[in-house]
Amino acid sequence: MQIGPYRLKNQLIVAPMAGVTDQPFRNLCLRYGAALAVSEMLSSNPEVWDTDKSRLRMTHAGEDGIRSVQIAGADPELMANAAVVNVQQGAQIIDINMGCPAKKVNKKLAGSALLQDPVQVEAILRAVVAAVDVPVTLKIRTGWAPEHRNGVHIAQIAEDCGIASLAVHGRTRQCMYKGDAEYDTIKAIKKQISIPVVANGDILTPEKARFVLDYTGVDALMIGRGAQGRPWIFREIQHYLDTGNKLAPVEMDEMRQVMLEHLELLYKLYGDFKGIRFARKHVGWYLDQEHQRPFRAEFNRLETVEEQCSMVERYFDEFVAN
C-alpha cells in the first residue's frame, strides 16, 4: 500500500487510540510487524499544546518507522495550522480524525460529529491538504447513526479533496463500540473510490483479518483494541496471511520480556507517578484472563516502580515453577 511517497511493507496499521498509542506502544507494534503506527489524537487547539499530555504527543525523538500524527478539531484554519506545526515537529503524514465517538470530542463538533456536516468536512480537508506538503490521511466511521450511513459520500469528498488514504471503522458514532462491526459500507466505499482504503473494527484474530481483506477488498487493515496487550498480533496476522497457518501462542518468556520492557518505557516517558498509572492499564490488557483477576487487583494497588516490576517478575517465575 502506498501513502504519498511512502510504501508500506505490508497491510497492517496500528489504529490511533487516545491514551494507548503513545511512543512505547507504537514502537512495540512496529517491532512486531506493523507497517505503520498512527499516533494518538492531538487537539488542533493551540491553547492546550503546552500541557504535558500534548507535549508528549508532539514529540517524535526516538520514533521508529514513518511518523503519522493524528489531529482533531472542527475549525479549518486551526486544523491547517495544527498540521503545519506537527510537520515542523517531524510528522511525515498528517491524519485527520473524523471517527472519534467520545462525547467530549463530539460536543465540540469534532471527531465523528463532523460526519453530519459534509460541507464542513470538505472545508477542513481542503484546508489541511493545502497547508502541508506531506500526505494527509483521514479516519472516519460509516456515518453518524445506522439510519444515516453516509460513509460513501464522505469518502468521495475525501478523494476529491486530495486525501491520500482513508481508514473506515465499521460502526456509526451512535454505535460507539457496541455490537459487531459491519463491513458492507467499507466494501461499498472501496468500490466507489480509487485512493487506498483501510478497514478497521473488530479485527481481533488472524482469521478475521483474512476474512475482512477478502470480503471488502481493502488495501490494508487497521488494528486497534486487538493489539492492546498483544503487540505480537501483527506478527500473528502476517504469518497467517502469508502461510494460512496460525503461529503458536507467544511464549511466556517473550511475554515477560515485552511486558517489563514496556513498563520501563512507560516510566521513562511519563515519569514514575504517571508511568505507574499507565502501567496498570497495559498490564491489565496483557493479563486479561479471568484467572488473572486477583493479580490485576493487587497490581493496581501498587504505588512504586520497584513494586510493579517485582510483581510482574514474580508472576512469571511462579508460572514457570508451576
Image (tube, rainbow, N blue to C red):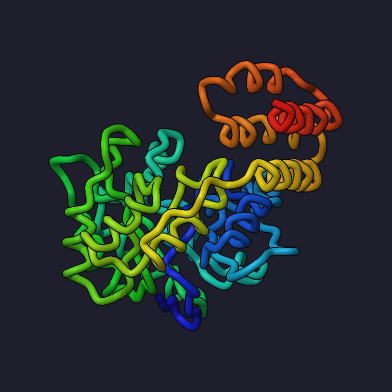
**42 to the left or right of 130:** right
Q: x and y percent of residue 199 in the render? A: 33, 58
Q: Is residue 270 visible?
A: no
Residue at far bottom of view: 5
> Where does residue 117 sit, x and y in percent of width and height?
25, 52
Above or below 251: residue 302: above
Direction from residue 107 to residue 316 in the image, left or right: right
Q: Position of residue 59 (x, y in %)?
A: 70, 59
Q: Residue pushed farthest right?
A: 306
Name the one closer to the observer, 15 or 254: 254
Q: Quadrant of residue 310?
A: top right
- Where does the N terminus fall, quadrant-wise? bottom left
Q: Residue, x 52% and y 67% (percent of image)? A: 35
On screen, 119 above or below 231? below
Quarter occupied by the C terminus: top right
Residue 231: x and y in percent read 57, 50
Residue furthest to the front: 322
Q: Is residue 66 left or right of residue 163?
A: right
Q: Residue at x 80, y 23 (%)?
A: 303
